[in-house]
Image: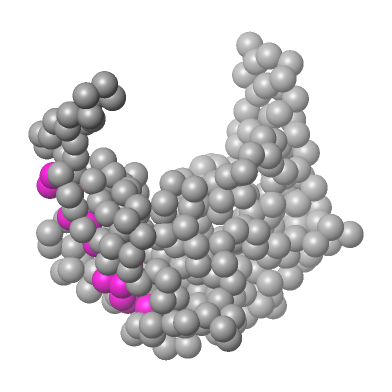
Amino acid sequence: MIMRTATWANIGNSVSSNTEMIGNIPAEMCFTVHKEPLFAINPTTDERTKINGFSTVINDSTGVAYGPVSDKYTAVDNLEALGAVQYIEDFKALKWGESSRGMQYLIGSLPNVNILGDEFTPHLVFRNSFDGSSNIQMAICPLRIVCQNQISWALKEANNSVNLRHTRNVGEKLAEAQRLICSTDKYMRELNKEAERYANIKLSKNNIDKIISELFPIPKDASDIQKARAQAKIDQFKKAYKCSDNQNFKGTAWGLINAFSDFASHAEIVRKTETAEENRFMTVTFDPRLFVALTNLINVYS
């Protein structure tokens, strides 16, 4: 039997008793940064010419340059960007790291919650970058323990994420982010309500097949390779749907949602590059569109 793991299992560094912490943040993440003008260098003469309108962000601890960014870009270091975790009761930092593109991230857990007889561990995931490629983002991501399925789902009555641009007034917005992240218990209560609602929505086999085919469409003009890849996704999704840990919810909308979270969290990686695990973690955690298509289809066919 293949053990399923969280999307972040094979990336980053694990927080241990030997990890130096500043509050709830690993000390190695608590470096400061500053901006410097960006120059173009003539390879022949070594002459430097300032590039107007652009700067680069420098790591004060290592001297690493993250840019280029606009001169209007305000670099917010991790201690300020992730400061909200200092105020979250029972937050336990688990993993942290830096992506291949220099993006900083921190993953932590909160006490377990029971949803429809399953234990879920709410996780808070934070990321920050200094090259303009990403905003400061924070997400509530419950993990279904029995199968390590990750749910990243913005609910109508309780959002699960914050997305903040690096701007001069970001400090005011970080206070708003702190309030949202500290209301994780509200999000989990709403998730439980939605789980109960979707568990009571019955779906026929015919409608389930229609939903799956629309989730993973195979165009008529698709090449053999494209057809094979789409069919592989369909097969993986159906396998997740039929999995033993989903038997109590087969024939229901919640069963499809469980299967989709399993598929998104554990689908076989086609191109096994050095950054494949990292890319999946980022996509599953921070792409709010993942559950939208499925729930829209459920509403159509229920």
Residue 57 located within the stretch drawn in magenta: no
Query: In this orientation, which residue lies closer to the viewer: 58 or 246?
Result: 58
Mark yes or no: residue 254 visible: no
| Picture residue at 34% right of the left edge, 84% below the top | 87
Query: In this orientation, which residue lies closer to the viewer: 88 or 81?
Result: 81
Give above or below for 189 relative to 300.
Answer: below
Give above or below for 200 relative to 292.
Answer: below
Residue at the extreme top of the image, as rendered = 221
The x and y percentages for residue 285 are 50, 56
Query: In this orientation, which residue lies closer to the viewer: 201 or 144?
Result: 144
| Picture residue at 65% right of the left edge, 62% below the top | 9
The x and y percentages for residue 243 are 81, 56
Mark yes or no: residue 5 visible: yes
| Picture residue at 68% right of the left edge, 39% below the top | 272
Query: Magenta segment, which residues?
Result: 70-85
The x and y percentages for residue 15 are 56, 76
Give above or below for 52 relative to 154.
Answer: above
Quadrant of residue 214 within the rendered picture: top right
Colouring scheme, one of rainbow, by chain, secondary structure, one colour = one colour
